[in-house]
């Protein structure tokens, strides 16, 4: 077992034994009826909820690299629809951030690295039609604002999105937590 995992499990035992979980008890339904799509960036773990005044239990949060909705069938969309239809969420917030690692990221670089680190890289074409396609799938985006509005647009036009769902697009600063509105819906 890795040292880090060992330390985490030790912390966990103490956390549970001392009932440190008590301040976080809440229900599975989001109190603020919100579902947030944001980036997996480690700087946002605590900063984003604090900067927006969100407590444990207030929102459903879905994360991926870049806060991107890539297609109408994206698993991110599935999660958002589950939140809207089954968990009483009513508003969607797509929150990108400045300094995102996905800005200008070239998927082909990852494919090249995979060739030296993955013993199954020769089978890329079994999953993707070509290496180029795998690279395109991994590509980042040009600007945060553009990605946020593209993702918002894709969600707004989704055939399964309830008509009365507001989809907002925001960008957060990963140090100050300052938020700018890219696109809002009233
Ligand atoms: Zn990011």
Image: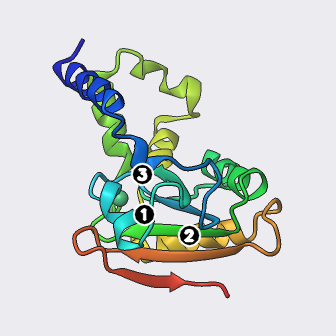
Give how far apart the Cα atoms at labels 1 and 3 are: 11 Å
Q: Residue at x 28, y 22 (%)?
A: 9
Q: Which percent across, then down, holds residue 179?
A: 38, 80
- Residue 102 visible to an observer of this rendering: no
Q: Residue at x 46, y 68 (%)?
A: 95
The answer to whether the residue labelled 2 contacts the one labelled 3, judged by CB atoms less than 8 Å apart, is: no
Q: Residues within 10 Å of mark 1 (few under 14, many from 20)?
A: some
Does 88 sit left or right of 36 as displayed? right
- Where 24 falls versus 184 (above or below)? above
| Disc number lying in front (1 or 3) | 3
Which mark is on residue 93? Answer: 2
- Element marked by disc 3: loop
Name the quarter where the C terminus is drawn.
bottom right
Quarter of image, res 160: bottom right
Earlier along the polypeptide chain: callout 2 or callout 3?
A: 3
Numbered tag placed on residue 65 in the rendering: 3
Q: Nearer the viewer, residue 108 or 83?
A: 83
Check if mark 1's residue and mark 2's residue have beta carbons within 8 Å.
no
Where ligand 1 lies, by quadrant? bottom left
Q: Earlier in the sequence, mark 1 or mark 2?
A: 2
Q: Which residue position is annotated with label 1?
A: 141
């Amino acid at each position: 077992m890795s040292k880090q995992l060992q330390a985490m499990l030790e912390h966990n035992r103490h956390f549970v034994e001392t009932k440190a979980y008590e301040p976080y008890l809440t229900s599975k339904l989001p109190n603020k009826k919100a579902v947030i799509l944001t980036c997996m960036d480690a700087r946002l773990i605590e900063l984003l909820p604090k900067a927006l005044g969100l407590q444990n239990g207030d929102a459903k949060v879905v994360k991926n690299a870049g806060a991107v909705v890539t297609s109408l069938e994206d698993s991110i969309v599935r999660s958002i629809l589950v939140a809207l239809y089954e968990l009483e969420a009513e508003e969607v917030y797509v929150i990108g951030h400045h300094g995102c690692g996905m800005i200008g990221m070239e998927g082909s670089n990852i494919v090249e690295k995979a060739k030296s680190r993955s013993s199954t890289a020769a089978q890329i074409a079994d999953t993707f039609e070509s290496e180029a396609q795998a690279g395109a799938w991994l590509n980042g985006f040009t600007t945060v604002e553009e990605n946020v509005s593209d993702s918002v647009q894709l969600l707004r036009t989704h055939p399964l999105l309830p008509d009365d769902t507001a989809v907002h697009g925001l960008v957060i600063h990963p140090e100050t937590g300052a938020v700018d509105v890219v696109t809002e819906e009233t």
